[in-house]
Image (spheres, rainbow, N blue to C red):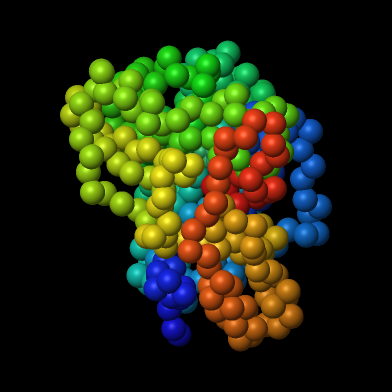
Amino acid sequence: MTSMIDPFGRAVTYLRVSVTDRCDFRCIYCMAEDMTFLPKAEVLSLEELDRLCSAFVRRGVRKLRLTGGEPLVRRNVMSLIRGLGRHLKTGDLEELTLTSNGSQLARFADELVDAGVRRINVSLDTLDPDRFEAITRWGKLDKVMEGIEAARRAGLHVKINTVALKNFNEDELDRMIEFCGANGFDMTLIETMPLGEIDQDRTDQYLPLSQVRERLESTWTLTDIPYKTGGPARYTEIAETGRKLGFITPLTHNFCEGCNRVRLTCTGTLYMCLGQDDAADLRAPLRASEADELLDAAIDEAIGRKPKGHDFVIERRGEGPAVGRHMSVTGG
Ligand code: SAM
Ligand code: SF4
């Protein structure tokens, strides 16, 4: 099988899959409070998701990240994860990983390790229980902290993802860096991205990471390191803790030239770029035949349309989001 090379010579080796658009939280920058979720009939079954992911692995994907919505709230998701683990055993897949809000991790950490998962990204924007409840609209911090601890105990490498939000967690970032340092976690700071209608204007929350970094450097010694994942993160090492600190700045930096990824939604729509609306439907060719020829042809056609880059801007106050879909559709 030929590997997937896009028109700009970039090999697609990383697939991110949103296994559900549903979530047990409603983070204010991510979702509206009264989100309408997809009818179940539109969502791919776990068997269909396995078949799709496996088609990508056959075509050269080496890293698979399950996300959402909250991947661990999808019923029976462990059967999908265990099934995909077979590609790790054959060596076709290098890494199977997840991005999670941590709420279900206490229950699943051991099983994840058993299935071959070695690393997990957990989103955590604050260490204050009241703030946590406010930002997630009803999440309980202690449950997430239990989940993170269970993941650590199970031997998972944890990376904490934190969205930097103006007037919300700016004053806590030092404490979070200490927390990550004490527990052996790397950390990544994320800028808010204009994805999907929410209940407020995102320009109110937008905090440029250039500014955050400058402030952090008055306390911490940050050294740029060449570590790259083919995504929008640039990494530093914190001398005082020995851990990595990443900065994801899709709005202020161009990271597209090294892009190695595509994103699949739980309805089988493939987005070739997080910041563009163009997409390809893979559900129809998947369902049209039990053989994979139609699917392979649709994947080739889609990769042939992967754009050179994105065009996010978040400067005009009061305008709608740059991209209509929510982050929970493609999982970030
Ligand atoms: N529910 C899981 C979680 O929270 O980790 C996985 C899905 S969530 C959509 C993936 C990541 O996207 C989280 O780290 C979240 O903070 C981030 N995110 C969601 N909406 C965002 C936005 N508009 N801008 C930047 N990051 C966002
Ligand atoms: Fe759910 Fe993750 Fe979005 Fe928060 S960021 S609402 S946890 S999908």
Query: In the image, what residue occupies the spot 48% across and 27% down?
Result: 207
Residue found at the very far left of the displayed protein: 239
The total of numbered circles placed on residues is 0
Q: Is residue 4 left or right of residue 302?
A: left
Query: In the image, what residue occupies the spot 51% across and 21% down?
Result: 166
Query: In the image, what residue occupies the spot 36% across and 34% down?
Result: 187
At which x and y percent is residue 319?
69, 36
Query: In the image, what residue occupies the spot 42% across and 17% down?
Result: 172
Image quarter (top left, top right, bottom left or bottom right) of the N terminus: bottom left
At which x and y percent is residue 100?
52, 41
Q: Is residue 20 visible?
A: yes
Q: Is residue 50 left or right of residue 209?
A: right
Q: 209 or 113, which is in the foreground?
A: 209
Q: 191 or 161, which is in the foreground?
A: 191
Query: From the viewer's perspective, is residue 31 above or below residue 217?
Result: below
At which x and y percent is residue 126?
48, 21
Q: Is residue 143 visible?
A: no
Picture quadrant where residue 23 is located: top right
Q: Is residue 26 left or right of residue 53?
A: right
Query: From the viewer's perspective, is residue 307 above or below residue 36?
Result: below
At which x and y percent is residue 265?
64, 57
Residue found at the very far front of the displayed protein: 316
Query: From the viewer's perspective, is residue 25 above or below residue 226?
Result: above
Picture quadrant where residue 49 is located: bottom right
